Amino acid sequence: MQTKIVAGIEALAALLIIGASTIWAPVCQKLLTLDNGNQVHMKCHYAGQAAVLIAAIILVSAVIAFLAKKDHKLVQVIVVVCAITIFVVFTDYMGICKSSDMMCHTTAIWVRVGAGIAGIAAVADMLMGKEGQLPS
């Protein structure tokens, strides 16, 4: 029963990340003009795209964990890796805009909270119970 609750929490965290990245706190849509006159999206646009994709993986993993009869703790490793990846994407790997008044800073907060919730829930599920305590 507790595994189903944890999977539900992870699914809600994934939906929080997707919703923040696309609906209530999307990254800014401004474009950078290059020296040759072409325009490209800023790096926060790509970080937001990556967050949605990684959150989709968390959502699928949560559904698999919800439906699994056993070995659901192995799926939680995927959720932990995805949560860490989201933090890396919004800090070092892709990053967000330097200007603190840009919308992507709000997006980053929402996404980090969602990733933190999913990661903590996954670790808690891996540590709960006696049978199959940790993945082998």
Image (cartoon, rainbow, N blue to C red):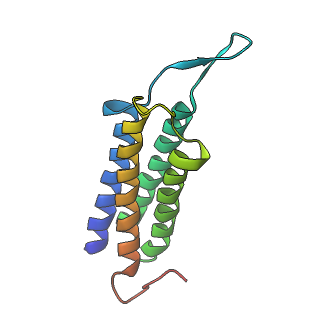
Q: Is residue 114 above or below residue 51?
A: below
Closer-to-camera residue (36/55): 36
> Which quadrant is the N terminus positioned in?
bottom left
Q: Quadrant of residue 108?
A: top left
Residue drawn at point x = 31 percent, y = 71 percent: 3
The reply to whether residue 96 is visible in this rendering is yes
Q: Is residue 21 above or below residue 78?
A: above
Query: Residue 87 placed where, x, y %?
Result: 49, 53
Query: Residue 123 placed where, x, y %?
Result: 40, 72
Is 52 on the left or on the right of 23, as rendered?
Answer: right
Q: How many marks?
A: 0
> Which quadrant is the C terminus positioned in?
bottom right
Is 62 on the left or on the right of 74, as rendered?
Answer: left
Residue drawn at point x = 49 percent, y = 51 percent: 86
Q: Quadrant of residue 129?
A: bottom left
Query: Residue 23 placed where, x, y %?
Result: 34, 31
Closer-to-camera residue (56/101): 101
Residue drawn at point x = 34 percent, y = 59 percent: 117
Seen as rendered, the residue at the extreme top is 37
Closer-to-camera residue (3/67): 3
Query: Residue 75 placed where, x, y %?
Result: 48, 67
Q: Quadrant of residue 4?
A: bottom left
The reply to whether residue 69 is visible in this rendering is no
Is 136 on the left or on the right of 118, as rendered?
Answer: right
Seen as rendered, the residue at the extreme bottom is 130
Q: Is residue 38 above or below residue 136?
A: above
Residue drawn at point x = 38 percent, y = 81 percent: 127
